[in-house]
Image (cartoon, rainbow, N blue to C red):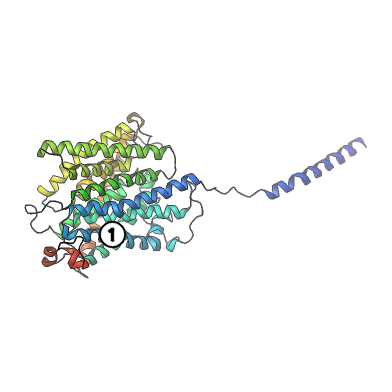
Amino acid sequence: MLTTALHRACGAAFVLTLALVEPAFAQAPAATAAALDSGNTAWMLTATALVLFMTLPGLALFYGGLVQSRNVLSVLMHCFAITCVVSILWAILAYSLIFSGEAAWLGNLDKAFLAGLDKIKTPGNFPETVFVMYQMTFAIITPALIIGAFPERVTFPFIILFTVLWLLFVYVPVAHWVWGGGWLATKNVIDFAGGIVVHTTAGVSALVAAMVIGARKGFPSHILPPHNPGMTMAGGAMLWVGWFGFNGGSALAADGAAGSAVLATHLAAAAGAATWSVVEWLRFGKPSSVGAVTGMVAGLATITPAAGHTGPIAAIVLGVLAGVVCFLVVRAVKTTLKTDDSLDVFGVHGVGGMLGSLAVAFTGTPSFGGAGLAEGMTASSQLGVQLLAVAVTVVWSAIATWVMIKAIETVCRCRAGEEAEREGLDLTAHGERAYDLK
């Protein structure tokens, strides 16, 4: 009897406990949804604005001051038009081809027309719409960099067609390989903010385009100096400030990595500008404003792939290397290769991006003050992966650019006519002048 009563009491206690606990379980969600991080969201929105500011108006003014007064409006128009074209293509399919799917070579169309975006993107816990816009600004500035190789001598239709083809056949696949989970990402390649995806692709494509399109009339002995170095300095200063979003935003969070990347970015820019000025001073007897701002951009391009992995002292070293190496290559392109890469896109962006992409294998290690490499990677194994990524990107960018320019030539004229070059593209292509010359 005692045993039976005990069993009944235990059963009643179990039923009572279940009755009390069951509602709590019923109210609990099956899984905890990611919560929006307002701090990260605010930082990524700010970084997005900074990167767009790099193209409009930063790069536009930087390039605009370097050309002749009769062509400055055409350069501004090219940057503006590229922004419009890339933005539309990005929303329709480019974003999806990079960041959806798990294929090794190219993404899919699951997010074409920006369908199916996540409300909260992890890591970072900010809306995917913000990530879409942030990455769009990278896609905008990359083809805009290339136009510095052939200003003052190409038609406006060529700019539009080249932008469309280059974005889809160069930028999209390389960005997927490196940032979209493609085959290079699986090998632990490091490209924090675009030394490979942005600067190597743009620099190599610029060199090939300059070779195919040909030099300006009078190159190299009768090319006039920049019409407005002050405009170039102002545009360069905007690039310097905007680059904090370019590199700092690539941490995808308002955290220590972003702070470290911004510090490294600033120091590399300062070291690059100072070094270029010293080299120019020793070589020509005077440091120029154009030289200083060019060295700054070289330092920025070089630190870009390594910013989130490199300590402050190593960033200064990279800036110094950029100031020397990029200076020498810029001169070699014009004197040895006899190529009119007019605004030095390959020597500054291409060489800087490749230099930083290879150097991160060492500057990223703790012994150099870096944040460390991927798990299981040593300096030598990381260097091998970086070499592979740079080599493949160089070859793909060069071949694809040559093919697409030849293809464009079959449907429209790439090179402006002699009269247009003589009168200037501002008037002949757009019917306007940047300045009142009366």
| Image quarter in which the N terminus is found | top right
Disc 1 marks which amino acid? Trp
Look at the image and tell me whether residue 296 can be seen.
yes
What is the quadrant of residue 241 in the picture? top left
**Residue furthest to the bottom:** 411
Q: Position of residue 249 (x, y in %)?
A: 39, 45
Left/right of residue 173 with respect to residue 413 in the rendered view: right
**Considering depth in this image, is 257 or 201 the residue closer to the camera?**
257
Residue at the far left in the pictured view = 221
Residue sitting at x 22%, y 58%: 75
The image position of residue 269, as x and y in percent, is 27, 40
Quadrant that contains the C terminus: bottom left
Near-viewer residue (187 or 279): 279
Picture coordinates of residue 271, whole percent (x, y): 25, 36
Would you name the residue on which mark 1 appears? 166
- Locate residue 283: give its quadrant: top left
Disc 1, SS: helix
Which residue occupies the foreground of this view, 102 or 53? 53
- From the viewer's perspective, is residue 432 above or below residue 248? below
